[in-house]
């Protein structure tokens, strides 16, 4: 019987070289950069020319480095003493550049000063300065190949221009610590789910780069859900984000909801408020305690009636965020001095057209001077402005043409303009001339208000009628959100069947 003897394999052979141990994950980044820096494509050395890592990393080339994947490297694990020595050398190098390394005391640094030099060179080529690094020195803890290149490559793929990547990092340096797959891509997917156009994604991120630090299922989702609950259509959220992305980072309980509830308490229906926010989402950025509430108190102190606050805000929502007290004081003085309108008349005009708070005084003075130049007394001009403050925004060229047609073709007394100054706010070619000619053909004599202040359909019905009915007042706001409609035969059956809020929504001034 033959016996087979099996020998145990040797643990290692003395004649063979002992393989180096793989580096732990905490040192893989530093060792990888050290190995790759020797053959980096950023080196300015010609092919075949010998060069050190330092000479390669300190290239004077201004060309932005191309993106490449990290390479797998091996190295020797540093001992505690070697790590301390490397940290001292790296700290001295950073100090020589004017960078304070104090905040890097508890951060894992690379094993070689050459790797740190490469990081500094890469960051400075992005356009960041030493001051930027001192403002956020933790940038130096990011690996070029495992942090910076993947993130910057993803941002450029989204559409952020390469020359603006430095500005992006300066505005939100924490982005270089993020994971593309785990943190950045879900935010972009969330924005696309809100119907933000793909071409608008880079614009949104450049305006508010901190969005990349939010969790989609957290603050952003809560803000969107609350806005939808007050009446905003989900498809309208995307344009709002493009215009004012900052509301996605606002907390509902402390910022958005208190502002909405305060405006509703003033008498604004939620449906009107939702329309305001859709067109002007930046209203959500007004501070409730420091800006909105004080401005409402200022309006009341200047004599604005509380029941008129909803119409004032609905017509000109920006009034909530202006330095209102100073503006109102200036405009009130101008109205009294130049337009001969007393403070009470100024307030009544502002209730009808709150935009006069921000109108330039030279713009408002030109229409007034034109009317005075036609021989109209100052007192009558003042009354016309109080009755129709939209006159202050009319262009004098159009007013001249309308006035000439009024005097030469219509041959009416100027007194009718005192009673209906809104005449100057209508288009001469598209409304005044065509309607007047139809009246002249039928031989109908009526007031300016009767044939101008109605829709085309209503004007057609009036021409077909057997008599001229009296004008009826229009809708008006009432404190508490109700809308009072004049009960007359002019209101159609359809309007009578609608709720007050629906009529308000349909008849409210265009935002």
Image: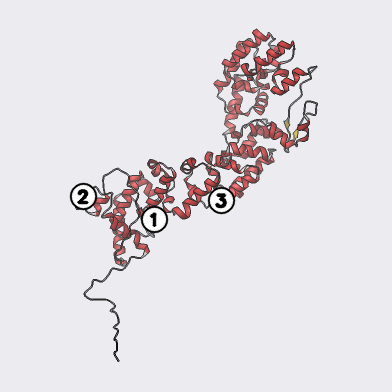
Between the C-alphas of marks 1 and 3, the distance is: 30 Å
Between the C-alphas of marks 3 and 2, the distance is: 53 Å
- Give the x, y percent position of residue 136: 40, 50
- Give the x, y percent position of residue 309: 67, 34
Task: Kindly indicate whether the residue at mark 3 contacts the one at mark 1 (C-beta within 8 angstroms).
Answer: no
Q: Residue furthest front?
A: 1
Compared to residue 88, the image places residue 452 above or below, namely: above
Disc number for residue 219 = 3
Which structural element holds mark 2?
A: loop
Q: Earlier in the sequence, mark 1 or mark 3?
A: 1
Compared to residue 227, the image places residue 54 above or below, namely: below
Instruction: State the residue position of label 2.
Output: 47
Q: Residues within 10 Å of mark 2 (few under 14, many from 20)?
A: few
Is residue 289 shown to the viewer in this render? no
Between the C-alphas of marks 2 and 1, the distance is: 40 Å
Residue shown at the point (62%, 16%) measured from the top left: 428
Residue shown at the point (25%, 53%) measured from the top left: 54
Disc number for residue 103 = 1
- Give the x, y percent position of residue 270: 67, 40
- Give the x, y percent position of residue 230: 65, 44
Which structural element holds mark 3?
A: helix
Tell which tag, 3 or 2, sits nearer the viewer.
2
């Amino acid at each position: 019987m033959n016996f087979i003897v099996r020998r145990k394999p040797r643990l290692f052979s003395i004649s063979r070289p002992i393989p180096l141990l793989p580096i732990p994950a905490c040192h893989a980044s530093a060792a990888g950069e050290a190995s790759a820096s020797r053959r980096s494509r950023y080196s300015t050395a010609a092919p075949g020319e010998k060069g050190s890592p330092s000479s390669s990393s300190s290239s004077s080339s201004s060309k932005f480095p191309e993106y490449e994947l990290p390479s797998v490297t091996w190295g020797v694990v540093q001992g505690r003493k070697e790590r301390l020595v490397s940290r001292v050398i790296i700290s001295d190098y950073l100090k020589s550049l004017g960078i304070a390394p104090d905040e890097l005391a508890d951060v894992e640094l690379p094993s070689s000063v050459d790797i740190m030099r490469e990081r500094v060179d890469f960051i400075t080529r992005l356009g960041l300065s030493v001051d930027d690094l001192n403002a956020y020195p933790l940038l130096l803890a990011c690996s070029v190949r495992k942090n910076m290149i993947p993130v910057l490559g993803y941002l450029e793929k989204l559409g952020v221009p390469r020359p603006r990547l430095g500005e992006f990092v300066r505005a939100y340096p924490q982005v270089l610590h993020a994971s593309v797959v785990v943190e950045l891509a879900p935010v972009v997917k969330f924005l696309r789910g809100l119907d933000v156009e793909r071409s608008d994604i880079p614009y949104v991120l450049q305006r508010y780069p901190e969005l990349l630090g939010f969790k989609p299922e957290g603050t952003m989702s809560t803000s969107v859900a609350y806005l939808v609950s007050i009446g905003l259509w989900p498809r309208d959220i995307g344009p709002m984000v493009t215009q004012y992305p900052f509301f996605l980072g606002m907390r509902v309980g402390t910022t958005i909801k208190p502002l909405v509830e305060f405006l509703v308490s003033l008498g604004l229906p939620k449906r009107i408020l939702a329309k305001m926010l859709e067109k002007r989402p930046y209203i959500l950025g007004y501070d409730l305690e420091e800006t909105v509430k004080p401005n409402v108190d200022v309006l009341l102190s200047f004599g604005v009636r509380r029941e008129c606050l909803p119409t004032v805000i609905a017509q000109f929502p920006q009034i909530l965020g202006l330095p209102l007290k100073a503006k109102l004081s200036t405009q009130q003085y101008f109205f009294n001095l130049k337009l001969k309108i007393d403070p009470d008349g100024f307030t009544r005009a502002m209730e009808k057209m709150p935009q006069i708070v921000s109108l330039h005084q030279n713009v408002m003075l030109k229409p007034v001077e034109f009317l005075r130049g036609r021989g109209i007394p100052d007192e009558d001009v003042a009354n016309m402005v109080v009755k129709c403050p939209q006159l202050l925004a009319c262009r004098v060229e159009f007013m001249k043409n309308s006035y000439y047609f009024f005097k030469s073709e219509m041959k009416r007394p100027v007194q009718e303009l005192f009673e209906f100054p809104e005449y100057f706010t209508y288009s001469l070619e598209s409304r005044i001339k065509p309607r007047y000619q139809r009246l002249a053909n039928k031989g109908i004599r009526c007031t300016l208000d009767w044939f101008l202040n109605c829709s085309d359909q209503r004007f057609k019905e009036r021409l077909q009628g057997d008599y001229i009915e009296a004008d009826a007042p229009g809708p008006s706001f009432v404190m508490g959100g109700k809308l009072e409609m004049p009960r007359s035969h002019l209101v159609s059956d359809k309007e009578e069947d609608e709720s007050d809020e629906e009529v308000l929504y349909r008849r409210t001034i265009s935002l």
